[in-house]
Image (cartoon, rainbow, N blue to C red):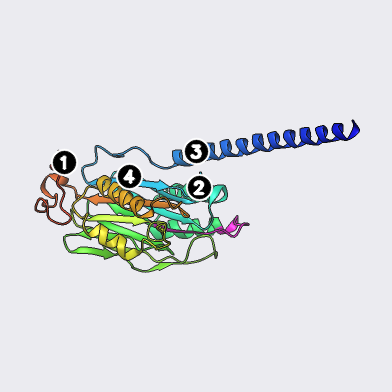
Amino acid sequence: MLAIDLIQTSVQRCVDNLEEETRARERVESELRIAGDIQASLLPGEFPPFPDRKEIEIHATMEPARQVGGDYYDFFFIDSRRLCLTVGDVSDKGVPAALFMAMCKTLLKSKAWRGLPCQQIVEETNDDLHADNRACMFVTLVFAVLDVETGELQLCNCGHLAPLRLSSRGLEALSGPGGPMLGVMEGTRYPSASIRLEPGDLLFLYTDGLPDAQDPAGQSYSDRRMKELLRGLTNRSPGELVREVEAAFRAFRGDRPAFDDITMLALRYWGPAGPASQEPESPVRGAPGGDPRPPRPR
């Protein structure tokens, strides 16, 4: 009887431990879901975000590889004519990356609202991140300020993939002067580039989770494949472009789990006159890259 009692006690302890581990795992999963919801709420999620602004169209998305990601995007007006844009990628994943991302986003936004030049905004943010960076994390990002009246774009690239411009002249990587990732070294200088967007130009910012994604056979999507896809989407609206890139990416990836966050931001600049007189001509119906759908209402 003693042996049977010992066995029953041991079995009961195993059951109790398993139930406790299950409850603990469920609590962690619940907290991660909540953290993911909080992170999503920090990103602009209503599109179109500025329905009364005829000068621009904008659309963005962030798909985390886990419940919580380290990528982010943001856009906001700091006055009646200057629009700030940013896309970033934190070095880690999960909750630590999300916290670092939130801190970076807050610093950039608070400094931008002070009316500082693009270069100074980035340099002060770098110093602030470095001062409290005990985990030795960093973030690559593109930060830009667009004057919607003139099309002038002030651009700082901090160790990130070059933004792409799609225009009547084709696809161009805006690979001007830049600096290293933020948070690594105090006092780093980040020169800015000045670029003129013409009415009808589309600006595309993204993180490396897109070209680095792999299919079930382990083949990378690649920067080349992504740019070929974008060349066929020049006449799409920002929302259409982002959704078609997402669809192509998911078809390529198949059932292979994502191993990195994926973020995209697309902006069409129409100029102060708006899209009525500047919308690119639609390609011939049925031609490669053509849009078989009727034109969007204006």
- Viewer-nearest residue: 211 or 198: 211
Q: Earlier in the sequence, mark 4 or mark 3?
A: 3
Quick check: 135 left or right of 259? Answer: right
In what element is the residue under mark 2?
loop
Q: Which residue is mark 1?
A: 296
Q: Earlier in the sequence, mark 3 or mark 1?
A: 3
Q: Residue furthest left?
A: 284
Q: Which residue is mark 2?
A: 66
| Whole-number angstrom distance, CA of label 4 to CA of label 3 | 27 Å
Q: Earlier in the sequence, mark 1 or mark 2?
A: 2
- Residue 167 quadrant: bottom left
User: Residue 263: percent from the left, percent from the top?
Assistant: 39, 51
| Residue 250 belongs to the span the image colors magenta | no
Q: Residue furthest bottom?
A: 177
User: Residue 128: percent from the left, percent from the top?
Assistant: 54, 55
Placement of the C terminus among the 4 image quadrants: top left
